[in-house]
Image: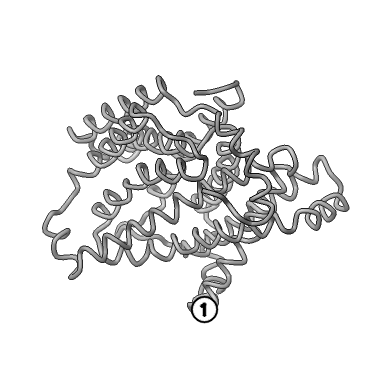
Amino acid sequence: MFRDKDSIVVFVLYIVLSVSQGLLVTATKNANGGYSFNFTTVVLIMEICKLLVSIIAFLMHNSILSLQREVFKNIKFALLYVFPAALYCLYNNLQFVNLANFDPTTYHILLQSRIVVTGFIYQIFFAVNLNIKQWISLIILTLGCIIKQIDLLNIQQLSTSTSNISYAILLVLAQVTCSSIASVYIELLIKSKDKQVNIWLQNIFMYTVSIFCNLIVLCFSGSLSDIISLDSITSIFQIPVLLIIANWVGLGLITSFFLKNLNSILKTFASGLDLVFIAILSSFFFSIPITGFTVLSILVISLAFWMYSKNPVTRKETAVVAEKLNSIKNGVIDS
């Protein structure tokens, strides 16, 4: 499952930063369950910070002229990042729509379908057939994540929160599909150009396009002025909020190395393990009780991870990626 020590370090760092992010966000909630800062402003600043860190990291080993040369040399490849950036923008907007249709618990239960969806998308993009044991571990992981939320589920809310439940569920599936395709697509881009294009340069491409896409959406939605207002900007200058930004930047950057050294399938298991550690640490820091459902969820998720560790996805996809290089250069991903 881990080919070297670097892969283990990346895996552990991803979980640590992801768990820290969940705890920090929970810690900044006010008595009404809201936030004293503009979350969209934080997201935009976080993207800008990730871009700046990537530029600095690249320039630590390269000159500014080299950066300019590499950008112009790989401009067509950079444009390929428009697709996943646009998908993530759509994902973020669908998130608001879906949270309006469902209560948060129901929403997060439905969101767990991304685990199985990622499996299907991964097979298509990498032409790798997951075996029955791998599928079983993915399904068990999905059940474990759902169980974590069951004790908070309000069945009455589920049946009355929206007048068209089928349409609302389709919107959640659309959101899940956007996230899964974007993640696997980025993994394919990173691995396809791993030796030709520096990982930091690829991050520069991704975050530049992402910022551009987000600004376009904010301009058309008419909310850009609110995001960059003095009140929104000054509200982030709180130690907890700055910690969220710093941690989020680290998580975003480590994710690119996760996709480079590991894969999107293992990333879903890492996200499942996040729930286990967040549940345990939330009980310690915020006195959030660990219920029977939480204990059962921890056991099921642990079982899924153990099963997958015995039958992990191998790196056979590397050969497939190499064969698809020409297609990627032309902006086409064969499925």
Q: Amino acid at mark 1?
A: Phe
Residue 90, above or below 274? below
Q: Quadrant of residue 51?
A: bottom right
Q: Which residue is located at x 65 percent, y 42 percent? A: 192
Across and down, in percent, residue 236 comes to: 53, 60
Residue 58, above or below 161? above
Q: Quadrant of residue 228?
A: bottom right
Q: Nearer the viewer, residue 193 or 293?
A: 193
Across and down, in percent, residue 311 comes to: 41, 23
Across and down, in percent, residue 6 comes to: 61, 26
**Could you classify mark 1 by the number of other residues whose Cα lies within 10 Å: few (under 14), some (14-19), or many (20 or more)?**
few
Q: Which residue is located at x 60 percent, y 33 percent? A: 318
Q: Nearer the viewer, residue 207 or 169?
A: 169
Residue 5, above or below 276? above
Compared across the picture, whether 300 is left or right of 77 comes to left
Q: Which residue is located at x 55 percent, y 28 percent? A: 315
In the rendered image, which residue does mark 1 sit on?
A: 220
Across and down, in percent, residue 208 comes to: 66, 59
Q: How many marks?
A: 1
Q: Quadrant of residue 163?
A: bottom left
Residue 299, above or below 323? above
Compared across the picture, whether 57 is left or right of 86 comes to right
Compared across the picture, whether 52 is left or right of 43 comes to right
Q: Secondary structure at mark 1?
A: helix
Q: Residue furthest left?
A: 156
Compared across the picture, whether 61 is left or right of 303 comes to right
Q: Nearer the viewer, residue 262 or 224?
A: 262
Q: How is the image coloured?
A: one colour
Q: Which residue is located at x 74 percent, y 58 percent? A: 75
